[in-house]
Image (spheres, helix red, strand yellow):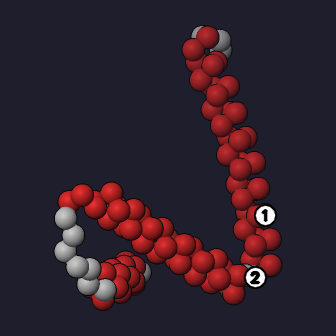
Amino acid sequence: MGTRYFLVGFFILLVLGFEAQGAPVPQQDETSSPALLTQMQESLLGYWDTAKAAAQKLYKKTYLPTVDEKIRDIYSKSTAAVTTYAGIITDQVFSMLSGED
């Protein structure tokens, strides 16, 4: 499983590296560095928007209502259990601190 994430990450970095090398920019003087920063920000935001759109498209493509209902049900049951046990532990701590038997 870890190898799969490594390969996906490597592939993404490889594609982004080729994108960065694909468009050579002529040498500019240092007075235009704010413009360069703006271009970098716009480029990064463009990559982010593209990735976000791809993720949303993939989510909509693979969305299964029954799985979503199961996940919501499991979440509600687990939060109810955690709330119950947190209340029990809190009562035990208060009981220990107050010294009651």
Residue 86 quadrant: top right
Query: Is 91 situated above or below 61?
Result: above
Q: Secondary structure at mark 2?
A: loop
* Residue 32 drawn at (x, y percent): 28, 61
Question: Marks 2 and 1: in contact by CB < 8 Å?
Answer: no
Residue at which label 1 appears: 73
Viewer-proximal residue among 40 and 85? 40
Q: Residue drawn 74% across and 77% down?
A: 67
Report the side of 47 relative to 75 (left or right): left
Q: Residue drawn 76% across and 56% down?
A: 76
The kind of residue on which mark 2 rests is Leu
> Can you say which quadrant of the picture contains the N terminus?
bottom left
Residue at which label 2 appears: 64
Q: Earlier along the polypeptide chain: callout 1 or callout 2?
A: 2
* Residue 82 drawn at (x, y percent): 67, 46
Viewer-proximal residue among 37 and 48? 37
* Residue 35 drawn at (x, y percent): 35, 62
Viewer-proximal residue among 51 and 90? 51
